[in-house]
Structure formats: structure tokens, C-alpha cells
Image (spheres, rainbow, N blue to C red):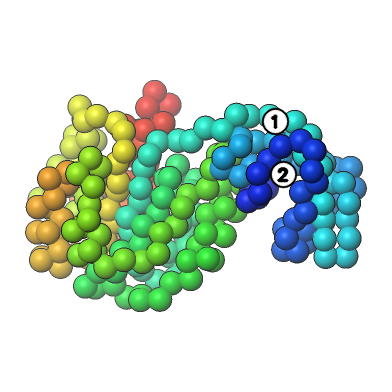
Amino acid sequence: MIRLYVTPGLTTGPRLALAAEQAHYLTHVMRLKHGDELLVFNGRDGEWRARIAAVGKRACELEVLDRTRAQSTGPDLDLVVALVKRARLETIVEKAAELGARRVRLAITERTNAERTNVARLAAIAAEAAEQTGRLDVPQIAAPQKLERLLAEWPADRPLMFCDEAGEAPPALEALAGRAPGSWAVLIGPEGGFSAKERAAIRALPGAVPVSLGPRILRADTAAIAALTLWQAALGDLRGA
Ligand code: SAM
């Protein structure tokens, strides 16, 4: 069944009027018509079965029927990624949604090659990916922040899996073995890598866990996919998969 992420509260009774873009997506792209059913979720109230109750030229109303799944969320896992070129960043956000990241934080580093980023577009990409995966929430996309500031305000209770390609770190699964699951973050650098000063500042964090993703230098998007998968396999919802 088609799944749609909506923002209003979900309950039976009041009809849900969709925004023009979502109405177009359902009726023109997915060709749903009056009476067809779909699933809706908002990241708070679980997943609900709904029916197309009214279709207009650029409008669509849903009748919310019954709840199919109670609200649940995956591991409390953040992906902190240095800003990279737009297409690659969009891929990273899509894959982060598929691999269960709860939040994507964008870092401006010394070698970042993109300053301005369309966070609203990244949020739409995250929502679309979440719709495909069956998850009941959508990763939050936090506005870009200077790495220095991000590290200065780093929460002591959130270990940081630091993906360090400089060759001085143990393999990821070895580094994560025996560590407690819980609230974590994965850090991926820019195409040009972290500067020596940044690397030292990251490693100085009490919760920093430097890891290697293998002998080959991976592109930032590949590194993000590999790191999220390894964390989920070691401490997340891929354990026992
Ligand atoms: N500085 C690198 C270079 O020599 O051009 C490339 C950086 S790489 C494209 C982007 C980021 O992916 C790195 O900062 C790191 O976080 C991660 N990464 C890539 N390959 C890795 C590896 N083998 N081990 C750990 N992290 C890796």
C-alpha cells in the first residue's frame, strides 16, 4: 500500500486535507481515485489506514479509518556529515533514512565544498525515503553548523563513531565490540577529508570512537552507508539480522 507522511495529528473523524503537492502525487502520479486506500503516518501517532474521500482539481481529502501500527522509532542514531556536493548529499540523506538514522546533522568543515544547502529539499527527500521504508518516523534534518561549534556543544552522553580514513583507527566492528547501544552518532568527513586540526579536536572528545571503514578511501556517500550499516549491525536494529 502507498504510504504517505503527513504532519497533522492522526485520528478517526475529521477529514485530512492534503497539500496540493501531495494531492497531485496521489491522484496524478500514483493514480489513486475516490475510495482507494493508503497508509498515512506523522511520526507521532503511529500508522493509519485512510481512504480517498474527495478529489478536486488540485485538492484531495482523506478519511482516516483505523490505526494499523502503534508509534515506534528505531535506535537514537544521528548521522553527522560534512557538507558535500548537492547530489551526493541528497543520496546520503536518502540512505540515512533507509538505514534508520533518527537525525542528520550537517557540518561545515575547513574543506567543505558547499556552504549553502536547501534543508527543506533534504527534508522532503528524507520523508519520501521514509515512506518507502515502512518506518513510522522521518529523520530530522538539522541546519548546517560549523564543526567547531558542533564539537564544542557535543553531549557527553552521546558516543561519536568517528570515521577516520587516516589509517590510525581500528576496524569499525572491532572498535564497537562490547560498547553499550543507546544514543550514538556517526561522523563522516568531506570529500577532502578532515584537517589535522579538526581530526585532533574530534579525537579529543571524551566520547569519540575512531573507526576505520577498511583499507580503501571511500567517497563520503559510500562511507555514510557503510558506517550506518556497521553501527546498526553492531549496536542497532540489524543485530541478529
Ligand atoms: N581525505 C580523503 C582523501 O584522501 O581524499 C577522502 C575523504 S573521504 C572521501 C570522506 C570521508 O569518508 C572521510 O572524511 C571519512 O569520514 C570517510 N571515509 C572514507 N573512507 C574511509 C575509510 N576507509 N575509513 C574510515 N573513514 C572513511
Callout 2: 10 Å neighbours few (<14), some, many (20+)? few
Q: Residue at x 35, y 62 (%)?
A: 106
Q: Quadrant of the C terminus?
A: top left
Tell which residue pokes out farthest to the top in this image: 240
Q: Earlier in the sequence, mark 2 or mark 1?
A: 2
Q: Position of residue 222 (x, y in %)?
A: 37, 55
Mark 1 lies within 8 Å of ligand 1 (Cβ measured)? no
Disc 2 to disc 1, C-alpha distance = 15 Å
Q: Position of residue 156 (x, y in %)?
A: 19, 44
Mark toward the viewer: 2 or 1: 1
Circle 2: residue type = Ile
* Residue that numbered label 1 is attached to: 67
Q: Residue at x 29, y 72 (%)?
A: 112
Q: Residue at x 23, y 47 (%)?
A: 155
Q: Position of residue 237 (x, y in %)?
A: 41, 31
Circle 1: residue type = Arg
In the picture, measured across the screen, residue 37 lies left or right of residue 159, that is: right
Q: Residue at x 53, y 65 (%)?
A: 120
Is 181 or 196 nearer to us in this picture? 181
Vertically, is 146 above or below 240? below
